[in-house]
Image (cartoon, coloured by chain):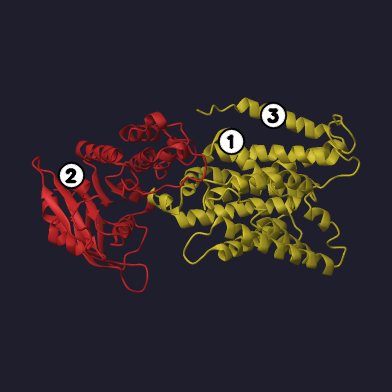
Chain colours: A red, B yellow
């Protein structure tokens, strides 16, 4: 049995004087695809930033594949875990391939241009995210869906064992959402890549992820399979509005607002 | 739009530019006799032109990447002005050796950059384009005023040449300084080229750079120090030559793309060539009188700066 991809015990962290996240514990097994759900400001993005070492933790333990995050060197960490941000601003005319190559930074040779291994990894990442045909296009000129795929390809070029995604489907229409989540699930199934993403789309998270975490005000309210976490009482507690959860005939779980919309 | 490396065109342009610069001068157009005083003088100016142009362009390219800002350049951000103040102070104190001047320039330039950046940065966030430009302008004019005060208060003997030098000139004060500057700027070019992957990552933001395994804060600090060293050395050698660091990296990006592996060498070569040609023009257009080359680069660079500022849509806020 391999070490879990993420193991967090008694985590305490925050920006100001008062810790925002307190005594948070959870784990994501290796090879799992999981989602962090919760209202705006619940601490989802902060948690991702903690996991990739952008914030120091105040107390607790945080291990990736059994190794404490704080003890990893920057380049070791980059080979273990990658984060695809929600948005990428590219202030110079980089091509798609140049952006994806940035994912290789920790491995690129210092005294020469990219090695064959790097070119292969970059091409494989672009192929995985279906952006190989765009490789010489300037990043600025891409559509929202294409950009998001390039950002994820950049993270994949790191060849990580754990992929963190910050709202990978936030600005996309339904067909692009399905496309991106489909590509990610295929990666998860075929190469055993562990995935943790944040999302506001409860239906898609239930459809694509095996394990869900419900986060509210920096606390873990519930975790488990979609059936266990997406229940009407729990959702009312977290999102403070009336939602209806239904299991469809084909087994999918759907969440929709109650007729009267938000009660409070 | 795969960019083919047309290195031979570059080399041809380079050779033609050097030949033109050697043939042009206050003495008129003509190839100087090898080894003659005119030949030596022109050779030193071409050499200085390449060193200073490469230094300023590399500094500009690095600053644009690290501050994620298309208008960053050692002159605009006040670094050159701070370096000039450092040099003038060193001259007044009698520290005029080939190493003392670049060191004083670096100290002045780095303090200025730190001040500009601190003034422009709201608590805990990265500075915006406009606050950065504004504080650069303000700190720049304060250091300019201090420089003027030093000049007027100082015994005239020590700073006689300084007004001319402030306007920017490739009239090399000493062969030793030229050699030191060549070493320093050469070292910056090689070091910063080897960190090209880090600069590429930092162009996408400090968070992205962190995620892909760069120790972002350290790398930014090192990059700014390298840029300041290159710019300050250029100032110690040739005074205030503006806008080369702004214009050249933009032109180089159009030619070879934004990847620093190609951008940095291309900027250095293009900057050297541009400044050498500007200097040849400055020496010969009004012969036998010379126009300060800094005046010429400002005349070209000012309108260019405005055109980027106007077309800025899509660049970082």
Inter-mark Cα distance, 3 to 1: 17 Å
Q: Quadrant of residue B140?
A: bottom right
Residue A16 drawn at (x, y percent): 37, 71
Residue A196 drawn at (x, y percent): 25, 50
Mark nearest the camera among 2 and 3 is: 2
Left of A15 or right of it: where is B27? right
> Looking at the image, how many numbered discs can be counted on the residues?
3
Q: Label 2 neighbourhood size at 10 Å, few (<14), some (14-19), many (20+)?
A: some
Mark nearest the camera among 3 and 1 is: 1
The residue marked by circle 2 belongs to what chain?
A
Nearer the N terminus, badge 3 or badge 1? Answer: 3
Q: Which mark is residue B152?
A: none
Q: Look at the numbered disc 1 and give the secondary structure of its residue.
A: helix
Q: Quadrant of residue B111?
A: bottom right
Asked if labels 1 and 3 touch by Cβ distance under 8 angstroms, the answer is: no
Vertical comparison of B46 with B128: above or below: above
Left of B196 or right of it: where is B139? right
Q: Look at the numbered disc 3 and give the secondary structure of its residue.
A: helix
Please tell me which residue is depicted at 79% across the width and 52% down the height of the picture.
B167
Task: From the image, tell me which residue sits under label 1.
Answer: B254
Task: From the image, tell me which residue sits under label 3.
Answer: B13
Q: Which mark is residue A207?
A: 2
Vertical comparison of B36 with A163: above or below: above
Inter-mark Cα distance, 2 to 3: 60 Å
Please tell me which residue is depicted at 35% across the width and 63% down the height of the picture.
A56
The residue marked by circle 1 belongs to what chain?
B
Left of B235 or right of it: where is B195? left
């Amino acid at each position: 049995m391999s070490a879990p991809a993420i193991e967090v015990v008694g985590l305490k962290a925050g920006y100001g004087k008062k810790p925002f996240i307190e005594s948070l514990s959870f784990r994501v097994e290796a090879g799992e695809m999981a989602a962090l759900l919760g209202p705006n400001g619940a601490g989802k993005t902060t948690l991702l930033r903690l996991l990739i070492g952008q914030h120091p933790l105040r107390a607790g333990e945080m291990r990736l594949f059994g190794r404490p995050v704080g003890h990893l060197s920057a380049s070791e960490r980059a080979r273990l875990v990658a984060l695809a941000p929600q948005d990428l601003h590219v202030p110079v005319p980089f091509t798609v391939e140049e952006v994806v190559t940035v994912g290789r930074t920790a491995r690129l040779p210092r005294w020469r241009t990219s090695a064959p291994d790097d070119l292969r990894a970059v091409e494989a990442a672009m192929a995985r995210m279906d952006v190989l045909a765009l490789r010489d296009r300037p990043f600025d000129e891409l559509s929202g869906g294409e950009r998001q795929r390039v950002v994820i390809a950049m993270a994949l070029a790191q060849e990580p064992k754990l992929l963190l995604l910050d709202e990978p489907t936030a600005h996309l229409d339904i067909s692009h959402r399905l496309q991106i989540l489909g590509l990610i699930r295929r990666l998860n199934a075929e190469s055993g890549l562990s995935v943790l993403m944040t999302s506001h789309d409860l239906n898609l998270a239930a459809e694509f992820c095996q394990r869900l975490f419900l986060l509210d005000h920096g606390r873990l309210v519930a975790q488990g399979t979609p059936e266990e976490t997406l229940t009407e009482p729990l959702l009312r507690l977290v999102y403070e509005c009336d939602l209806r959860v239904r299991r469809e005939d084909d087994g999918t779980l759907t969440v929709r607002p109650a007729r009267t919309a938000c009660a409070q | 739009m795969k960019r083919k490396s047309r290195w031979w065109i570059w080399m041809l342009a380079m050779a033609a530019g050097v030949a033109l610069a050697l043939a042009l001068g206050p003495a008129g157009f003509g190839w100087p006799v090898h080894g003659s005083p005119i030949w030596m003088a022109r050779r030193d100016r071409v050499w200085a032109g390449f060193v200073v142009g490469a230094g300023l362009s590399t500094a500009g390219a690095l600053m644009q990447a690290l501050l994620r800002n298309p208008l960053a350049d050692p002159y605009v951000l006040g670094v050159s002005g701070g370096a000039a103040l450092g040099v003038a102070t060193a001259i007044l104190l009698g520290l005029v050796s080939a190493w003392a001047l670049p060191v004083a320039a670096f100290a002045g330039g780095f303090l200025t950059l730190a001040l500009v950046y601190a003034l422009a940065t709201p608590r805990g966030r990265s500075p915006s384009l406009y606050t950065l430009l504004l504080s650069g302008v303000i700190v720049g004019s304060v250091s300019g005023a201090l420089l003027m005060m030093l000049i007027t208060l100082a015994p005239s003997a020590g700073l006689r040449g300084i007004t001319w030098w402030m306007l920017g000139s490739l009239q090399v004060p000493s062969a030793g300084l030229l050699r030191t500057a060549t070493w320093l700027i050469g070292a910056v070019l090689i070091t910063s080229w080897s960190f090209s992957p880090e600069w590429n990552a930092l162009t996408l933001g400090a968070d992205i750079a962190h995620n892909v395994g760069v120790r972002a804060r350290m790398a930014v600090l090192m990059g700014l120090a390298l840029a300041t060293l290159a710019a300050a050395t250029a100032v110690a050698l040739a005074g205030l030559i503006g806008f080369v660091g702004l214009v050249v990296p933009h032109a180089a990006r159009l030619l070879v793309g934004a990847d620093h592996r190609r951008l940095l060498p291309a900027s250095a070569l293009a900057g050297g060539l541009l400044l050498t040609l500007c200097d040849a023009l400055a020496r010969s257009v009004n012969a036998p009188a010379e126009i300060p080359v800094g005046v010429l680069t400002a005349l070209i660079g000012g309108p260019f700066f405005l055109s980027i500022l106007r077309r800025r849509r899509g660049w970082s806020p």
